[in-house]
């Protein structure tokens, strides 16, 4: 049976930069970079399309951005204002469907399946949502309609900037893509797959169907909002900690997450368990809490692989509010004792983690720590079995 396309993905184009241009029309048509001034430390949050033409993209160091595009207008940004507009955006979407999933500050999935009998055409309905959101925020929004989240996200990407795209032959379209076009397949995974002769999604589907299923499922059920998720059926392990005082230094935040991830990795290695998914949680100083999950490219317990996922999720979470953090946590789930797919993927990382776990078991957890984790030595007393965190809590 053909699936009814009912997932709409909406993404505000160059969000922060677009807001700045809206408030100051003199900036229209100019390269605008939000994130900080050109000489400051820090990274680009958003670059306008004009700036992107010079090779500037989000996540890039501000100084690199200035080298590439010296004529750009650099702005520090007004986070509270962006949050207000983001709230307007989500509120508008919620009028059209009870099922709205906020993915990030400027991105959401809207499930239109409940409304398919209300309207003559789902496409009209989707276009109406996009038009209303654009009217109410005053910003250009790209929208994609498909029967899966992955399809909808790819469609809205194809629609950028400002367009609407409906995937006609969704399965065929996705199968035809190069694997690195799939969000969640990083350059490293794509490189390894390339070496195996897998360059298109169709190759992946044919040769490693269970790996593809994982990647696809990672998009389709891992992004539900925290409160509304179905009760977890599979066991999970998590480690979290509240800081002695609120922290805004990114390096220090990453150091805490590296340490918590290390504890999880050693635990998994000892238990001989592979994690399929990982979630990072942050709590800001105003107690608002956000979580973001991702499917790991393959089940693993390798510290380096787990931390790679943590590091990829963190920037999006920190973007939610411009406030210091009071707590961070990491959770691994989808645990399995065996895995049938591409075990050689991570053999090195895993034998390293297993070796470290052995050393830690014999000489104490603190016997070997990474450089990043050692940043925490100034903050906490170090004992044989690890750092003495303010609150170390283990959840089920
Ligand atoms: Mg966007």
Image: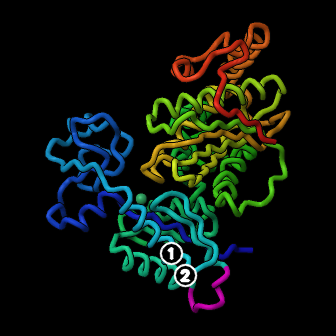
User: Label 2 belongs to which residue?
Assistant: 95
- The color scheme shown is rainbow
Label 2 secondary element: loop
Does residue 143 appear in the picture of this structure?
yes
- Residue 64: image quadrant is top left
- Residue 199: image quadrant is top right
Along the line of sight, the residue nearer the viewer: 222 or 377: 377
Does residue 351 appear in the picture of this structure?
no
Give me the residue at 14% from left, 64% from top: 26
Provide residue 1's location: percent of width, then percent of height. Answer: 75, 74
Dot 2 surroundings within 10 Å: few (below 14), some, or many (20 or more)?
few
User: Label 1 belongs to which residue?
Assistant: 91
Q: CA distance from mark 1 to mark 2?
A: 7 Å
Give me the residue at 67% from left, 37% from top: 240
Assess mark 1: CB under 8 A from ligand 1? no
Label 1 secondary element: helix
Chain part drawn in magenta = 114-121
Is residue 116 magenta-colored? yes
Provide residue 334's location: percent of width, then percent of height. Answer: 77, 44
Would you say 38 lies left or right of 363 here? left
Give me the residue at 60% from left, 79% from top: 97
Is residue 85 magenta-colored? no
Majority SS type along the magenta span: loop
CB within 8 Å, label 1 to label 2: yes
Quadrant field for ligand 1: bottom left
Along the line of sight, the residue nearer the viewer: 216 or 308: 308
Dot 1 surroundings within 10 Å: few (below 14), some, or many (20 or more)?
some
Badge number at residue 170:
none
- Residue 207: image quadrant is top right
Q: Is residue 272 above or below residue 103?
A: above
Provide residue 344's location: percent of width, then percent of height. Answer: 71, 25
Provide residue 218's location: percent of width, then percent of height. Answer: 67, 51
């Amino acid at each position: 049976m053909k699936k009814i396309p009912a997932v709409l993905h909406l993404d505000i184009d160059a969000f922060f930069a677009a807001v700045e241009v809206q408030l100051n029309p003199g900036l229209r048509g100019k390269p605008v970079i939000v994130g900080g001034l050109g000489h400051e430390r820090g990274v680009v949050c958003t670059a306008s399309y004009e700036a992107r033409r010079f090779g500037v993209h989000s996540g890039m160091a501000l100084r690199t951005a200035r080298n590439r595009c010296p004529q750009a207008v650099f702005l520090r940004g007004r986070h509270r204002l962006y949050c207000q507009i983001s709230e307007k955006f989500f509120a508008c979407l919620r009028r059209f469907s009870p099922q709205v999933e906020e993915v990030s500050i400027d991105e959401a999935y809207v499930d239109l399946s409940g409304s398919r009998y209300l309207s003559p055409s789902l496409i009209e309905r989707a276009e109406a949502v996009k038009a209303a959101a654009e009217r109410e925020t005053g910003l250009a929004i790209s929208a994609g309609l498909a029967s899966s989240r992955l399809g909808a996200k790819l469609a809205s990407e194809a629609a950028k900037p400002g367009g609407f795209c409906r995937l006609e032959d969704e399965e065929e379209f996705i199968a035809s893509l190069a694997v690195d076009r799939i969000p969640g397949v990083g350059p490293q995974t794509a490189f390894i797959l390339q070496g195996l002769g897998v360059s298109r999604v169709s190759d992946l589907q044919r040769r490693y169907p269970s790996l593809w299923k994982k990647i696809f499922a990672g998009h389709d059920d891992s992004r539900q909002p925290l409160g509304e998720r179905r009760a977890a059926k599979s066991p999970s392990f998590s480690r979290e900690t509240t800081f002695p005082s609120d922290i805004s230094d990114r390096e220090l935040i990453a150091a805490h997450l590296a340490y918590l991830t290390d504890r999880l990795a050693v635990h998994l290695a000892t238990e001989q368990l592979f994690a399929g998914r990982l979630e990072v949680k942050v709590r800001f100083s105003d107690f608002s809490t956000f979580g973001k999950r991702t499917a790991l490219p393959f089940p693993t317990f390798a510290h380096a692989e787990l931390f790679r996922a943590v590091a990829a999720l963190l920037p999006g979470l920190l973007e939610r509010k411009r406030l210091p953090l009071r707590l961070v946590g990491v959770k691994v789930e989808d645990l399995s004792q065996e895995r049938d797919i591409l075990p050689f993927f991570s053999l090195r990382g895993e034998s390293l983690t297993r070796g470290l776990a052995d050393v830690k078991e014999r000489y104490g957890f603190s016997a070997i720590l990474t450089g990043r984790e050692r940043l925490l030595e100034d903050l906490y007393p170090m004992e044989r079995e690890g750092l003495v965190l303010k609150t170390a809590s283990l959840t089920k």
